[in-house]
Image (cartoon, grey):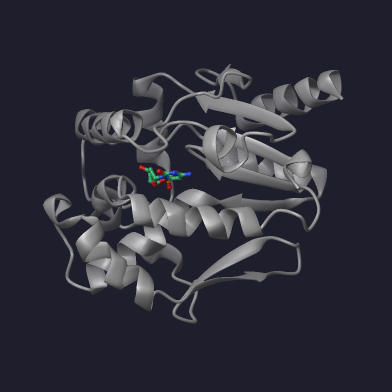
Amino acid sequence: MADSVIAIDGPAASGKSTVAARLAGRLGIAYVNTGNMFRAVTLAARRAGITQAADCTAEKLIPVLERLDLDYERNAEGNFELRLNGTFPGEALRSPEVAALVSPVATVGPVREFLKRRQREMAGHGWLVMEGRDIGTVIFPHARYKFFVTASPLERARRRLAQEGENFSGATLEEVAKAIAERDRIDSTREIAPLKPAPDAVTVDTTGMSIEEVVDFIVGRMEHEA
Ligand code: DC
């Protein structure tokens, strides 16, 4: 199964989602954004009244998981489209409220276990690009290809500000950089599955590179390793 997975990990706003989607498109294979799965759990938690980081505990989130109706529909392009309670959550996943709570939600063991099972089930239907924080380290430690996509903090803040659909309601570059740094801190210092490159991942520092250049680089490396 894992031999047909391309794992792409990296910090918030590193451009990895765009790169992963573009790579999958170029290779004609499916793409899974696991950050959206954590965001969907966060949206469901908020709807259940959990709105503070201090409330992101196993005790409070297990009932949310038990009621969670999270599934995937494969669209015409073969991509997995996430559905929450029967509808496509779309832009709600990218709201500042969800963005602010998703890292604390993602530290909770039962949330990670629940999503790990879902993510592993997605392999085995052909080649797949899966993108997240722990794909090459925990979900598919035997993935055929592994990349760790990053960029300087300033560049990441600029990219996040420029990103369509992410509504920062007038936030400054400095504020966005601070919010990203806080998510990095939580993601990389958590006990379970912290954000870090797998020992056998190829790190790509995309600062100053265009999306196409990054995708070209990744495809080049894959051809080299094949
Ligand atoms: O990629 P993203 O910014 O949409 O991810 C949202 C959050 O979800 C991120 O701050 C940490 C968490 N996450 C995770 O812990 N593991 C993953 N595989 C993907 C995302």
Q: Position of residue 20 (x, y in %)?
A: 63, 41
Q: Is 207 drawn above or below residue 180 in the view shown?
A: above
Q: Which residue corresponds to the image point at 78% horizontal and 48% vertical from the top-left? A: 127
Taking the image as shown, residue 215 lies to the left or right of residue 72, namely right
Residue 116 in view, yes or no: yes
Using the rendered view, name the quadrant where residue 98 is placed. Answer: bottom left
Q: Nearer the viewer, residue 69 or 159?
A: 69
Q: Quadrant of residue 40?
A: bottom left
Residue 8, image x, y percentages: 59, 35
Q: How many marks?
A: 0
Figure quadrant of the C terminus: top right
Image coordinates for residue 117, horizontal then vertical, percent:
54, 57
Q: Is residue 56 left or right of residue 99?
A: left
**Position above or below: 126 against 19:** below
Q: Quadrant of ligand 1?
A: top left
Q: Is residue 5 left or right of residue 197?
A: right
Q: Is residue 168 visible?
A: no
* 194 relative to 83, above or below: above
Q: Please state the horizontal and vertical placement of residue 3, each as a whole percent of the image.
A: 78, 39
Between 104 and 95, which is closer to the camera in this rendering? 104
Location of residue 87 with respect to 2 vertically, above or below: below
| Residue at the image point whose x is 27% and y is 29% from the top | 185
